[in-house]
Image (cartoon, rainbow, N blue to C red):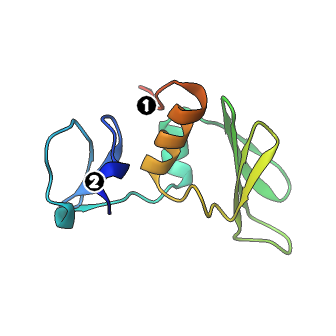
Amino acid sequence: MKANELRIGNWFIEYNDPQEFDGDFYHLSDIKFIELTEEWLLKFGFEFYETEKANNYKYSIWRFTFVTNGKTKGKKYANIFNALTFKELNLVTYVHQLQNLHFALTGEELTIKQS
């Protein structure tokens, strides 16, 4: 993990406890990235819709697809503006990466929505 990857408001894990970065100094050896999962997309307010072959989540400029059936079962895809596709989520695999890229592209923070 690199310290310059964390922005205030990014989520990470310290001592097995998810928390939001507040700008304080942390020992990098004590923190871990959070894998981007369907659960985290829902926490951020992504809208879920299901198709015959996939679970899909959309929000703002994003669409995430988690393939559940067919030849590509198990694959994950991220799509921005219906134009750029990151196959198998190579670029966006962690929560903080999604938060940072979302902010860079929209100028808006991606935060957990209260339910």
User: Where is mark 1, residue-wise?
Assistant: 111
Left/right of residue 62 with respect to residue 70 in the rendered view = left
**Residue farthest to the bottom, as pictured:** 71
Query: Which numbered disc, 1 or 2, marks the residue closer to the eye?
Result: 2
Camera-nearest residue between 37 and 60: 60
- Secondary structure, mark 2, is helix
**Mark 2 residue type:** Ala
Q: Badge 1, how many Cα within 10 Å: few under 14, some, many 20+?
A: some
Please indicate whether residue 30 sits to the left or right of residue 96 in the image: left
Asked if labels 2 and 1 touch by Cβ distance under 8 angstroms, the answer is: no
Instruction: Name the residue located 60 percent from the left edge and 35 percent from the top edge.
Output: 46
Residue that lies at the very extreme toward the front in this rendered image: 4
Q: Return the residue nearer the eye: 53 or 10.
A: 10
**Tag 1's secondary structure?**
loop
Q: Locate residue 103, reporting x and y percent.
A: 51, 32
Q: Which residue is mark 2?
A: 3
Assign the C terminus to one quadrant of the image. top left
The quadrant in which residue 9 appears is: top left
Q: What residue is shown at x 32% (from left), y 63% (from top)?
A: 1
Question: Looking at the rendered structure, which numbered label has been put on residue 17?
Answer: none
How much space separates mark 1 and mark 2, taking CA atoms?
A: 20 Å
Q: Position of residue 51 (x, y in %)?
A: 83, 50
Q: Position of residue 59 (x, y in %)?
A: 65, 32
Q: How many marks?
A: 2
Q: Quadrant of residue 101?
A: top right
Q: Earlier in the sequence, mark 1 or mark 2?
A: 2
**x%, y% of residue 13?**
27, 55
What kind of residue is marked 1? Thr
Query: Crowding at label 2, few (<14), some or many (≥20) Cα neighbours within 10 Å?
Result: few
**Residue sitting at x 81%, y 40%:** 82
